[in-house]
Image (cartoon, grey):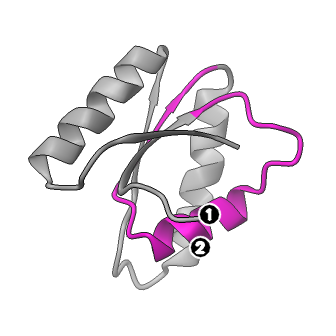
Amino acid sequence: MSVSRCIVLKLPLSTEADLAAFVDNCFASTVELIALCGEGGSDVEDELDDLIIAHDLSRSHMIVTATHATENGAIELAVDWAKRNSCGKAEVVTL
C-alpha cells in the first residue's frame, strides 16, 4: 500500500489495525506528517510516536504526528503541510 506523504488517520482504529505495519509503510512511502483525528487520538499518537522512534533510531527520517479534535482540523493541517512542503495531496486513511 502506497500512501501520500501527508496523511490524516481517522480514529477509532479497527480491531485488526496493525500500527507497526502502518508505520513501516509510512517510512517506505517517506511520509512526513500523520495528523490524527477522533476518539483516543492522544493514546494512538503516543503509540505511533513510540513505533516511529523505534523504527528509525538513526533519526534519518522523522515523521511528525499531531492530534486534532476534529477531522476538519486534521485535514486543514495536512493540506497546508502538503502545500508548504510540496508533498502532493493529503490523504485520509482508516485502519
Instruction: Judge left or right: residue 35 versus residue 38.
Output: left
> Where's the N terminus, which quadrant?
bottom right
Please report the residue visible at 34 percent of the width from the left and 42 percent of the height from the top.
90
Going 14% across and 55% down the picture, which residue do you hit? Answer: 86
- Residue 84 inside the magenta-drawn segment: no
> Looking at the picture, which amino acid does disc 1 mark?
Leu
Residue hosting label 1: 51
Question: Whole-Å distance between the Cαs marked 1 and 2?
Answer: 5 Å
Q: Residues within 10 Å of mark 1 (few under 14, many from 20)?
A: some
Q: Which residue is mark 2?
A: 54
Q: 49 and 24: which one is in front? A: 24
Residue in the image at 26% along x and 35% along y: 79
Image quadrant containing the C terminus = top right
Left or right: 2 as drawn, with respect to 78: right
Q: Secondary structure at mark 2?
A: helix
Q: Please, what is the three-letter code of the amino acid marked with disc 2?
A: Ala
Rendered view: 22 above or below 68: below
Read off the magenta span: 10-38
Tell me if 88 is positioned left or right of 74 in this view: left
